[in-house]
Amino acid sequence: MTAKFSNTKPMKSLNETINHLKKIYKKIEASKPKKYNICCPFCLKKTATLHFKYITAKYLKCSFCKSIYLSPTIDNSTLKKYFKLSSESSLINLIPMKTLKTRRKNLMLPRLKFYKKELKKIKFKLPVKEYLEIGPGVGYFTELAFSKKISKNYTLIEPDQNCNQILKSLNPNFKIINKNFEEIKINQIKKKFDLIFINSVIEHPHSIEKFFNKIKLCLSTNGMVCLTDMNASGIDNQILLEKTPNINPYSILQIASKEGLEILLSRFNLKILKVFSSGKFDMDMVYEFAKESDKNSHLKKYATILGSEKLRADLQKVFAKYYMTGYNSYIICHKNNTINK
Ligand SMILES: [Zn+2]
């Protein structure tokens, strides 16, 4: 059976999560936090256009690398307050258990199989000695990686307190660090990692610069980073704009385009070895939101255009061919990696 958007992200729980995050955002805004304008976090250029507004937040699109970022933004201490509030509200409880299982089976298992296949193609040997996952959440991906014996040792870095409790219950041998990755002191980790998995994380750090500097320091000489994240060139955000379900201030601070990520990585002597378009649900998602939207909304016409399931599936394939689905997956390594030499 093919994965369906409606099973993987049911509209009801999705809307509940969106409304909940909206309330937290409004709470932070009511405290009148200090804000400041920033340049593109990926290519560091200053010219950008307004991509969309979400209540009072402005998401800009970099004119040079086409990445999306929030500007003006808030300082790190306000951001921590935001994440504390969203952690206290245990958003994970809003998602039905059945959906979590479907998500693991339909999204994470194919993703893991895909990475295994691609790593084999570049002659990267599994299992590795040291596995690191940054922001594993409740550990859907970790559990699978462990069951498929990807590594001998597992280190998980997860700032959310609720998620930490769940991760601890998965396996007593997992080393779990309850911190933001970019704020960890390098001597606290004490080792280098052969394989680093990052699933939907890089949109959150206050300093994406510190985040990737730490990746550089943690990654073993021939180690690989498997990164799957939102894509700034995704057709989802280009059509849905502020309705794009995953884009909530201040949860999402920046979304990379492939070009933007490449420029950022080069500052740390890292490079993209391979890139794949990995979003599965863009057309279904646009269709679901179009059906629900107000009759005067620009989205309404997509409900008629995208009525055929077959058409949506075909369009999804075309957008994947042009790296225009909502997610990209990357295999990243040091520039001087010697694996294929
Ligand atoms: Zn840029």
Image (cartoon, rainbow, N blue to C red):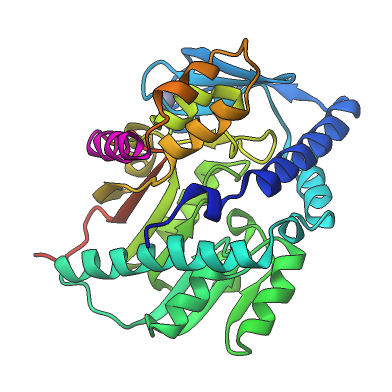
Residue at 41%, 52% in the rendered image: 228
Which quadrant of the figure contains the N terminus? Answer: bottom left
In magenta segment, residue 121? no
Q: Is residue 304 left or right of residue 245?
A: left
Position of residue 58 measured from the top left corner of the image (x, y, whole percent)? 64, 19
Identify the image quadrant of residue 188: bottom right
Q: Is residue 190 visible?
A: no
Q: Is residue 30 left or right of residue 187?
A: right
Give the camera-side residue of 190 and 224.
Answer: 224
Looking at the magenta stretch, what is its main secondary structure? helix
Residue at 42%, 56% in the rendered image: 3
Report the span colored magenta.
309-322
Residue placed furthest toward the left: 341
Quadrant of the picture in which ligand 1 is shown: top left
Q: Is residue 100 above or below residue 310?
A: below
Residue at 70%, 40% in the rendered image: 15
Q: Is residue 195 left or right of residue 137?
A: left
Identify the image quadrant of residue 115: bottom left
Q: Is residue 155 above or below residue 265?
A: below
Residue at 61%, 38% in the rendered image: 252
Position of residue 26 measured from the top left corner of the image (x, y, whole percent)? 84, 30
Position of residue 266 measured from the top left corner of the image (x, y, whole percent)? 32, 42
Give the camera-side residue of 108 and 25.
Answer: 108
Which quadrant of the figure contains the C terminus? Answer: bottom left
In magenta segment, residue 317? yes
Give the camera-side residue of 318 and 308.
Answer: 308
